[in-house]
Amino acid sequence: MKDYTQIFLGTAFTSKSPTEVQILKNNLFFVNADGMIDKIIAPEHLEYQNLVNSYKGKENFHQLEDHQYFLPGFVDLHVHAPQWAQAGTALDIPLNDWLNTYTFPIESKFSDLDFAKKVYNDVVSTLLANGTTTVLYFATVHKEASILLAQICAEKGQRGLVGKVVMDNPEENPDFYRDTDTNTALSDTEEFILAVKELGETYKQGVYPVVTPRFIPSCTDEALQGLGNLAAKYNTHIQSHCSESDWEHKYVQDRFQKNDAFALNDFGLLSDKSVMAHCNFISDEDADLFVETGTAIAHCPISNAYFANSVIPIAHFHSKGVEIGLGTDISGGFSPSLYDNIKQSVISSRMLEDGVNTKLPADERGVPGSRVTVNEAFYLATVGGGDSLSLPIGRLAENYIWDVQVIDTTNLPLYDSNDDLQDAFQKMIYLIRPENIREVWVQGEKVHSRG
Ligand code: GUN
Ligand code: FE
């Protein structure tokens, strides 16, 4: 651990509001030993030049080169770490067939810790290389391999929030891949929570246990209630899938005569530390319940295009005050990049707003007001994710954590140094690839770099 303040000098982009991106041009960022931004000083400040002169050349002074910029590290609210092993596979079959034919067999292999180590090392490194500094992960039903994922995040310096997945319902899960029984599912979860909490205490950036019923069909009532109790007892984050597909939404209606949101709430699974993936078919009443309980949506636009046959009206739910962040949903979404998901969220929203049924007259197509701009999608990937997890991340601002990506635009088509920086920002968000992400820092520590 560094025992001194580090100073960073450069131009940063950070969300000021959902629609506005603030440009901090040639600012000084003072980052303390805990990895928090203590102070930001702009060139207009009287002491600015003196400070730059006094720190220049020192080991703890980091100045960006021309054509380099700071962006906040991204927050991915929905990743199935084991599914990295099948990214891009069989995305043209229905969700339920995909789970049974491909996903459950591959997840069952994570009883093998050597296999788990290989895949988990790769997915954590890949996400860091894509600028993602905090990730909310589903692991598998296996306690040991789930602890291993938390350990790998801790060692690689990523802020991982990890869930051992609970699937105890013998009627909906295959015999080869489920918890042995309800009591074991709950006792394994409790042991997992304790192990990851202990691990989190020794790593600066934090790793966190997450209570994780896979989705309602996977779990018995007893497991859902037991998990609600464990989340309350240990004050953990909670994650699940909610109203993702027609099939799953209807299953919950048949079982509980209500939507997923209300059913989950009855079991104590909606709280200000809850993040629900997808939510394509939630109603306005469900959204109100999310606002009331502080529950957030993990919006997974690439995955939704394949498995949900719908576009969630994100702009509508955002305007109602629901917290929303972005998720790749590896591997329902094939891409490990939140840049790709930012773009897809913009594109999907345009298709919802403008409509795709060309048989209708132009003024009768689509849903007005559905547009998500690139600035708004960037907000979801940063501030939205941080707020959803109730962590001080996602903004480059005082009292926030120094989680950043250093972007090098040398190979991007930014030819004119007099380009408007707001335009340059949008161009960067559309065109950045891992090659342009030169460094990634988490909690004041450099955790990734490429030449
Ligand atoms: N619903 C339950 N499990 C899953 C999963 O692994 N991926 C997706 N997209 N939806 C799910
Ligand atoms: Fe998922």
Image: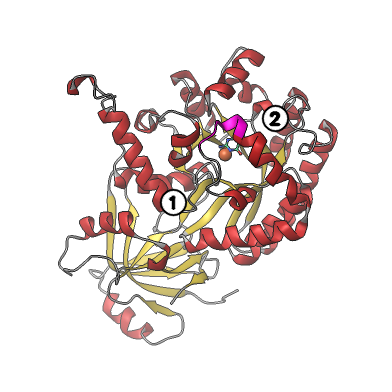
- Visible residue check, residue 270: no
Residue 96, quarter of picture = top right
* 386 versus 369 height, above or below: below
Residue plotted at (52% across, 40% down)? 91
Question: Residue 153, position in %: x, y?
Answer: 63, 60
Residue 205, quarter of picture = bottom right
Say whether disc 1 or disc 2 marks the residue closer to the N-terminus: 2
The residue carrying mark 2 has its beta carbon less than 8 Å from ligand 1: yes
Quadrant position of the N terminus in the picture: bottom right
Q: Which residue is mark 2?
A: 218
SS label for mark 2: helix
Residue plotted at (38% across, 33% down)? 314
Question: Residue 252, position in %: x, y?
Answer: 62, 19
Numbered range of the magenta stretch: 92-97
Residue plotted at (53% across, 43% down)? 329
244 with respect to 198 (left or right): left
Circle 2 residues within 10 Å: few <14, some 14–19, many ≥20:
many
* 177 versus 125 height, above or below: above
